[in-house]
Image: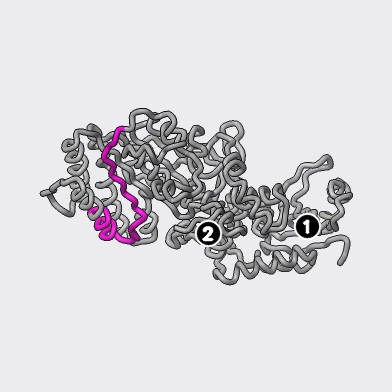
Amino acid sequence: MIRFDEVRYPIGIQDFRALRKGGYLYVDKTEYVARLIWRSKYIFLGRPRRFGKSLLLSTIEYYFRGEKELFDGTWIGDREDEWVAYPVLHFDMSRTMGTTAELMQAHITNRIKAYEKEYGIHYEGNPDDVGDRFSWLIESISKTLGKEVVILIDEYDNGILETLDSPKEEQEAMSNVLRAFYKQPKAMDRYVKFCMVTGVARFGSYTLFSGPNNYSDISMDPQFAAICGLTQHELLSAFCEGIDNLSKKLNQNREGTIEALRQKYDSYRFTESKELVYNPFSLLNAFAEKRLANYWIKSGTSKVFVKYLTRSEFDLLELQKIWVKSDRMEEKYSTEDSIPLLFQTGYLTIKEVKDGLFRLGIPNGEVRSALVDQLMPIYLGISEDEFPEMLSKLQRLVRNGDVPEWIAQIKVMMSKIPYRLFGPTDSKLTDEEARKKAKEQSIAHFERSYHLIVDLFFQMLSVEARSEIEIAGGRIDMVVETDRYVYVMEFKLDGTSIDALKQIDEKGYLIPWSADGRKVYKIGISFSSQYRNITDFDYYPKI
């Protein structure tokens, strides 16, 4: 094979042997393998898709197969002195479309048949009983070889996610197939050396997270904060050539490139540990193609999942600022509370930990783009083509400093938002006191809503947007910055833009940017609780 001097990035390489033998760049994660095995016999790890879960399981497989040469120069390779080979049963549930129980059962059965052939096992029971057939396989291999069996199950929730929007009968059929399969490792405990399961989300009816069969869930364990993904230290130590090449292509200095990578792909935080990680799939693609793009989004997300998520009972505004307890993030998913699934799938991440509470928010620029492409159009009732076009227009107007036009564009976008997003109404209440209370709640909710909606729009523009900024004179509602302009905004609910501009002047909100060199606008915007939109605005200096 012809070889080149440039780095070979392992994009899409999920097999540890192929990675090591193929001369691909490898960031050593084998210390985590040793810690996993020491930690527990039954492990569950949840991480968003494209975060390296499959490669991790492949690494564990080759370790248990005793293939010492693949680990030369790694943390575990320098310390392990036994290298005992165990039989390994590895099931990748993502290799089937998993859209029906029949397809999933056929996939599992075919994998079991392949292992039966490999180990010379003959099964005489019901060929359609995947649970019995799996347990027989585990016991027979262990007894034949005189060794315990290692079981690895990747993307366990694939079939579950793909049937979320299916009729109840189909969901129950899928549940029956998977439950029968997943309960076997613990049922056959005496024959099992180690068992690890990975996935995206937690679903309560599939044995892993219910009753005495609970697996040790390390998803939010600080010891394993960086088990998947790439840390800042790993980026700077292993990707020096990639950073330099990307800097040349972007025509900027090294520090600027590192910051651009951080803004685009970093800031995933899955535990109390302050360790942040990059999305590895996006980072590798950025270095290979020498450009910054939305690789994670383009790699595909289940449309069924997106549709189901947007149907669930959650407030889109919670995507920006929400404080929760840790047990809520670890909860099993239900339509009544989508926050756990949003966190587990990577749309939300931990931003801050304080007094036992976790503040969640959107991780980075790429995920904000995912919200535009996948969630926002469906949630707001806008076509997939219409919303990106509207957002692109808003970005152009903001970057050009056309204040009246970009405010008008925000007004158009807000008019598309369903009335239900702004909170409860009192139209069906008959009791006067109840009507009054409901109206107050509606207005209070709207006051929070309009601010966060505008904030969310700006967050998706790839500009610097910050809300509720504390300065000596008070708290600024919002500041948006581009390379040429600074927009200092004050919002008023059922007030006037004149009052908003007066507050900016009286409290000195413009002072922090007075010597900035960019053009600074002060903007007052009034929202109406009756019309659920912008009704008045003013700004200075005039264009």
Residue 60 colored magenta? no
In this rendering, the count of numbered labels is 2
The percent position of residue 536, horizontal first and vertical second, equals: 78, 63
Q: Which residues are magenta?
A: 84-109
Q: Which residue is mark 1?
A: 483
Q: Which residue is mark 2?
A: 297
Outermost left residue: 124
Q: Identify whether 94 is placed above or below 17.
A: below
The answer to whether mark 1 and mark 2 are in CB contact below 8 A is: no
Q: Residues within 10 Å of mark 1 (few under 14, many from 20)?
A: few
Mark 2: secondary structure: helix
Q: Nearer the viewer, residue 314 or 512?
A: 512
Q: Position of residue 14 (x, y in %)?
A: 42, 50
User: Above or below — where is 477 with respect to 73?
Assistant: below
- Tell me where residue 79 sits by quadrant: top left
| Disc 2 crowd, CA 10 A, few/some/many (<14, 14-19, 20+) | some
Q: Position of residue 515 (x, y in %)?
A: 89, 49
Closest to the observer, 472 or 424: 472
Left or right of 269: which side holds 144? left
Quadrant location, the N terminus = bottom left
- Residue 272 visible (yes or no): yes
Can I make out residue 440 in this image? Answer: no
Horizontally, residue 319 falls left or right of residue 529, namely left
In-image side of 292 versus 215 (left or right): right
| Label located before the other in sequence (1 or 2) | 2
Q: Amino acid at mark 1?
A: Asp
Residue 90 in magenta stretch: yes
CA gap, disc 1 and disc 2: 27 Å
Q: In which image quadrant can residue 411 be found?
A: bottom right
> Residue 298 location, x and y as percent?
51, 61
Q: Residue furthest front?
A: 2
